[in-house]
Amino acid sequence: MLLFSWSLAAFALFMGLRLTHAWFSRARGCDAWYFLMCAEELRSRRRLPVRLPSLYMLESDEQSYPPGFMVFCALFPDSFLKKYHWGITHAVDGLLACALFFIGHAITGQAVPALWGVAVYALLPALIGEYCCLTSRPLGCLFQFAFVLFTYGWLHGNSWFLVPTIFFGVLLLYTHKLSMQTLWFLFPFFAIMDWNVGWLFALFFAYCGAFLVRPGYFFKILRGHGDIVRFWHKNWPWLGAHQVNDSPVYGTQPLRAGYYARSLPSLVLAFAKIVLSNLAIAFTMIAPFVYSHLDAFAQFCFWWVLGTHIWAAAIEFLPFLRGIGLGIQYLKYAYLPTIFLAEAGISAIF
């Protein structure tokens, strides 16, 4: 009962800190408009895939984006969604903060260091900016986090964890592309570092489970996923380009603005700033020197953080990988294991 009360305190702490910074940007974002429309259509028609009116001139009315977050939003009344949609993203992320507290408490045996981890997570600048409006990203992060942890538990002695492993893997695939794309690298990386091919089987089982749920729709999602990857593989040089100045018709060539138009040192500096904005990363930098003194889970967290940063950097700086997203957006998948590693270090010191 006491631990439950502490978890409520952790959620309240998280929401208080996060909303203090996010409150004034709560009305931003075109994604909010998109997901509100999808939720309204799904609630009225009660069928997937969602079909939107012909509002997007260059794409089909039938939406191929993974539907998990649309279904989640459709569970709320329309009046509630329209008024409070800005808070849903942070509330879902608050569930991750509660998981962060419980695991932090298990690592340290104390509530205060676990609450410190929640406070650090709530105040991460990259998340405050990325989650400023209604988006599917935190729900994808939540399902990915559960998928990774249950897979780890399954492969390290608890065979019953295979069922939730597959369950959360299926939910992840039906909810968020970027979160699943992270695992294309991470699970093979874990298989090498952990010397356990079971990580690859977990990924295979997740895809098989998603296929069995609804085969036709599964392939529609994969086709949609492939379409967006091909689109960005072709057009990543124009990310953030100016509508007029960079136009081949109205612009003055060879002017080009945008995210990737910066010099390599500028890109590296921007990437490093986001990495270092996570204060807990300092403990990860120390971890190689005390690796043998860490317990098995802390060692796994070290490889989790390292693998995520390698993958994020590869996507950021290798042009042939830029079609699967912004590398800096992959860094958020390292925040929780970074904090766990920091808590393990704090617990060892004190």
Image (spheres, rainbow, N blue to C red):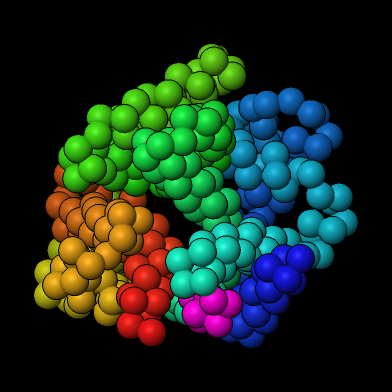
Q: Is residue 43 above or below residue 140?
A: above
x, y (%) of residue 220? 50, 22
Q: Is residue 218 above or below residue 32?
A: above
Instruction: Look at the magenta stretch and give its main secondary structure.
Output: helix
The part of the image, by quadrant, that contains residue 21 is bottom right
x, y (%) of residue 137? 52, 54
The part of the image, by quadrant, that contains residue 284 is bottom left
Q: Is residue 266 above or below residue 35?
A: below
Q: Is residue 347 above or below residue 135?
A: below
x, y (%) of residue 32? 64, 57
Judged left or right of residue 45, residue 301 is left
x, y (%) of residue 241? 32, 63
Judged left or right of residue 27, residue 330 is left
* Residue occupying image coordinates x 73% and y 71%: 2
Judged left or right of residue 238, residue 221 is right
The front one of 276 and 4 is 4
Q: Quadrant of the C terminus?
A: bottom left
Q: Quadrant of the N terminus?
A: bottom right
- Is residue 316 part of the magenta span, yes or no? no
* Residue occupying image coordinates x 76% and y 37%: 41
The part of the image, by quadrant, that contains residue 280 is bottom left
- The magenta span reads 110-117
**Residue 58 visible to the viewer:** no
* Residue occupying image coordinates x 27% and y 58%: 299
**Residue 152 visible to the viewer:** yes
User: For the image shown, how many numbered marks are present on the structure?
Assistant: 0
Judged left or right of residue 87, residue 224 is left
